Image: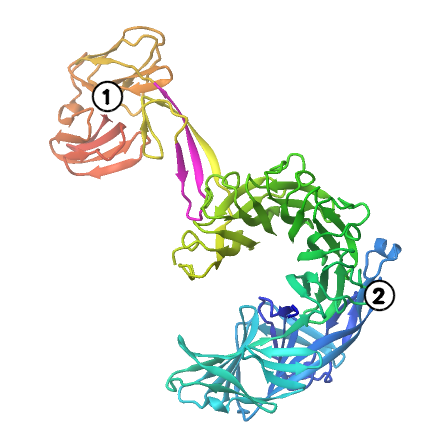
């Protein structure tokens, strides 16, 4: 059986702008245009001047090329076709005009309208607008020179009680134009019907869709879905000539019923008498669609004036074709030499250019003069990539390959106009640049990734593979110029980085592979993805939030699905498809450099009593971007010996520094006596004292000792208050007459305890010095207390 390729277009994921004029008089002017669409040239672009067939048009909108007009008695769909093109240079830059270059623009067009007219509906229905969009539009048409002003746009619109007990709501969902018939309880849904005018034929397709055939292509409404809550109701289209209605299975007439069709604009075959395969499609900012693949037919592919209008030879030619948003072919071209040529991928850039990538046996016809590689490298195949402008004129093309076999499988463009080519190779030279991530061939088959600028000059190229077989099947660009490479591998080492989702080969014949490079070609991370079976990846994509997605096939029964995701278990066949989402992040590596005395308790909860440079700890982030911290700990010994008596503190550390601390004052006044042996301190007054010893970079403070009956009598303010034990390991007792309470402050002055109890608990507080303010006998007395 002959193979046929096809291209299916649905609406882009954009909010439909349904325009309504809130000013009645201005609305009449806005809708007074004749029953056709007028096109004018505006800086080289053809613009729709808002088709307004009759004054009964209430709302107009467009969804990816389908212009629709909701009237008082139905809806109209407008389609168009470019019948001929012309060349002009008016909108090209001056330099390009001087070079004699031109641009293709539509010359003659055909516009066609299909009307959907409701039958037997209530003429007194009301309209309920959805959420109003920001801003408004002003229209100035030949039919209303004063303008239709302040035209608001809405996210949806509902016709209330269009049929008795039935509302009709138009809206956008999942990128497609939808309308719901909302049927109230105990309402006869069979009243809903309409006629179609302007169709050549109306049929029901093999998937239950309603097919409206027109001279400019098909408009399809997918098989209707009806439901009540979570209960699906059997639903189908019913055709009687050009009259359409619904046919439903059994349902609960006492509950609300929703009938939900989806409008699809067009679908088309693309092929001739041979075998033709569509392998890739891409869109541009103007809503055009490109289809690429390999073409075995000798005709039906290329348009007049295209880059290559005839089949080159061999079993296949690569091909590239452009459609506008209405499915109208703009141009199509073969791309191939005298032997087999395979188009595998296409991508567009922000300037409207389009790239075609693949692999070829042809030794001529693929590269342009001055390109990166103008001659065939050798082996069975060379990869290739070629750039066309939006009119289908080739800008440059290059081979990419060495002396062995090289396959170009995927291409992707970046925000700066760069383009990436990915694939796999057995060539051990010609693929990698000096200083790249991997400059040498790993063995057997390696994946590769190469970056070109918009002029086709190679920026860098790298192998990516180990000693096994490694395939690159997809590349995608992300934020900040990053690029992702996906495929699958049989290499057990060299493919994954530390701290990623899966650092080790899962088993089986192969694991899927995903790796991220920055714009300079430096690897950021790489991960395996697979279980004990065979796992492969054929596609990857990124989103605006920095997430990256991987798709492929697997025979693994574990290691693929996440807990709760859509399907957590294998379907049981030879292989299952899979889709996985990664948070794009780079594992951060840092070093915690610490000097401590005696011992140190690190963030991992371990207390180290000796120096350590091998401990590691992973800081797990909720987003999945973990950080790995390495400990660089130096522990210095703190040998000290403090002797104390009731009135003297002594130390005999050789080479130590001493600081004598008065614990009963809020600030320490002391002097440093260095390099002496046998230091002693004799208190000159009753109080609490300590000795601080520093040696070898380590400092420690002895406990605060209470020295009494030395030098002079105890001050009266202290005679009737006792605080003990001091130092303390946790609990303090305050003994005082007429005791009113105490405040406990740390050395920074922060209040940590306020209590009227006589026993104060410091067990939960860290070691160190504390200031107690004791209120007794109508006075406040301060004490320094040391917690061991």
Res. 162 mark: none
Q: Is residue 186 above or below residue 15?
A: below
* Residue labelled with disc 2: 87
Q: Nearer the viewer, residue 224 or 386?
A: 386
Q: Going 49% across and 54% down the picture, which residue do you hit?
A: 581
What residue occupies the far top of the structure in this picture? 677
* Quarter of the rendering occupied by the N terminus: bottom right
Q: Residue 747 appears at what percent x and percent y?
A: 31, 29
Q: Is residue 604 above or below residue 476?
A: above
* Residue labelled with disc 1: 703
Q: Main secondary structure of the magenta part?
A: strand
User: Element at badge 1?
Assistant: loop
Q: Residue 471 appears at what percent x and percent y?
A: 58, 48
Q: Residue 556 appears at what percent x and percent y?
A: 44, 53
The magenta-colored residue range is 616-636
User: Element at badge 2?
Assistant: strand
Determine which quarter of the picture holds residue 538.
Answer: bottom right
Q: Is residue 554 above or below residue 181?
A: above
Q: Residue 622 appears at what percent x and percent y?
A: 41, 48
Queried whether the magenta region covers residue 659, the answer comes back as no
Label 2 crowd (10 A; few <14 / some 14-19 / many >=20): few
């Amino acid at each position: 059986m002959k193979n046929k390729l096809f291209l299916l277009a649905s609406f882009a994921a954009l909010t439909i702008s349904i325009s309504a004029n809130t000013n009645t008089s201005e609305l009449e002017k806005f809708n007074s245009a004749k029953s056709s669409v007028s096109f004018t040239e505006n800086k080289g672009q053809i613009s729709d001047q808002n088709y307004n067939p009759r004054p009964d048009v209430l709302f107009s909108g467009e969804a990816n090329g389908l212009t629709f007009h909701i009237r008082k008695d139905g809806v109209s769909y407008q389609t168009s076709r470019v019948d001929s093109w012309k060349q002009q240079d008016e909108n090209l830059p001056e330099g390009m005009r001087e070079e004699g270059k031109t641009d293709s623009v539509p010359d003659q067009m055909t516009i066609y309208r299909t009307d959907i007219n409701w039958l037997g509906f209530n003429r007194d229905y009301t309209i309920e607008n959805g959420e109003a969009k920001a801003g408004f539009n002003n229209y100035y048409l030949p039919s209303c020179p004063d303008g239709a002003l302040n035209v608001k746009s809405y996210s949806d619109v509902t016709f209330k009680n269009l049929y008795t007990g039935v509302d009709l709501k138009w809206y956008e969902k999942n990128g497609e134009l939808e309308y719901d018939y909302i049927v109230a309880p105990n309402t006869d849904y069979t009243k809903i019907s309409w006629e179609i005018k302007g169709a050549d034929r109306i049929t029901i397709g093999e998937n239950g869709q309603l097919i409206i055939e027109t001279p400019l292509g098909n408009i399809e409404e997918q098989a209707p879905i009806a439901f009540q809550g979570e209960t699906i109701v059997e639903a189908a289209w019913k055709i009687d000539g050009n009259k359409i209605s619904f046919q439903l299975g059994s349902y609960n007439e006492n509950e609300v019923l929703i009938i939900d069709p989806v409008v699809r604009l067009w679908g088309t075959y693309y092929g001739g008498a041979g075998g033709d395969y569509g392998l890739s499609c891409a869109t541009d900012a103007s809503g055009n669609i490109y289809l690429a693949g390999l073409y075995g037919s000798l005709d039906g592919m290329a348009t007049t004036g295209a880059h290559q209008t005839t089949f080159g030879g061999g079993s296949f030619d690569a091909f590239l074709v452009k459609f506008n948003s209405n499915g109208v072919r703009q141009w199509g071209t073969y791309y191939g030499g005298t032997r087999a040529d395979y188009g595998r991928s296409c991508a567009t850039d922000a300037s409207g250019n389009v790239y075609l990538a693949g692999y070829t046996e042809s030794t001529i016809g693929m590269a342009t003069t001055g390109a990166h590689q103008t001659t065939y490298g050798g082996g069975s195949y060379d990869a290739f990539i070629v750039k066309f402008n939006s009119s289908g004129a080739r800008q440059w093309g290059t081979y990419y390959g060495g002396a062995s076999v090289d396959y170009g499988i995927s291409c992707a463009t970046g925000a700066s106009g760069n383009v990436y080519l990915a694939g796999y190779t057995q060539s051990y030279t010609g693929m990698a640049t000096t200083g790249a991530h991997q400059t040498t061939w790993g063995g057997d088959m390696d994946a590769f990734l190469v970056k070109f600028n918009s002029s086709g000059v190679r920026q860098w190229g790298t192998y990516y593979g180990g000693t096994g077989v490694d395939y690159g099947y997809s590349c995608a660009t992300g934020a900040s110029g990053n690029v992702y490479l996906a495929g699958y591998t049989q290499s057990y080492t060299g493919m994954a980085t530390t701290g990623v989702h899966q650092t080790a080969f899962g088993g089986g014949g192969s694991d899927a592979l995903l790796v991220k490079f920055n714009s300079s070609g430096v690897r950021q991370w790489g991960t395996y993805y697979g279980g004990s079976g065979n796992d492969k990846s054929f596609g990857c994509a990124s989103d605006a939030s920095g997430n990256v997605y991987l798709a492929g096939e697997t025979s693994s029964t574990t290691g693929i699905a996440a807990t709760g995701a859509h399907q957590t278990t294998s379907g049981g066949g030879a292989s299952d498809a899979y889709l996985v989402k990664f948070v794009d992040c780079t594992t951060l590596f840092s070093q915690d450099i610490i000097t401590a005395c005696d011992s140190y308790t690190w963030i991992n909860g371990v207390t180290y009593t000796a120096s350590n440079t091998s401990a590691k700890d992973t800081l797990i982030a909720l987003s999945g971007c973990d950080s790995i911290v390495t400990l660089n700990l130096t522990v210095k010994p703190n040998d000290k010996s403090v002797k104390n008596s009731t009135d003297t503190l002594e130390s005999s550390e050789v080479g130590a520094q001493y600081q004598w601390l008065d614990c009963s004052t809020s600030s320490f006044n002391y002097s440093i006596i260095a390099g002496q042996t046998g230091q002693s301190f004799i208190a000159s007054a009753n109080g609490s004292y300590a000795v601080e010893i520093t040696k070898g970079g380590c400092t420690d403070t002895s406990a605060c000792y209470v020295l009494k009956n030395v030098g002079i009598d105890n001050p009266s303010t202290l005679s009737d208050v006792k605080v003990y034990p001091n130092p303390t390991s946790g609990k303090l007792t305050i003994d005082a007459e007429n005791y009113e309470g105490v405040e406990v402050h740390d050395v920074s002055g922060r209040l940590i305890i306020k209590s009227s109890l006589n026993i104060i608990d410091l067990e939960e507080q860290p070691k160190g010095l504390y200031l107690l303010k004791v209120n007794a006998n109508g006075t406040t007395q301060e004490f320094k207390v040391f917690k061991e």
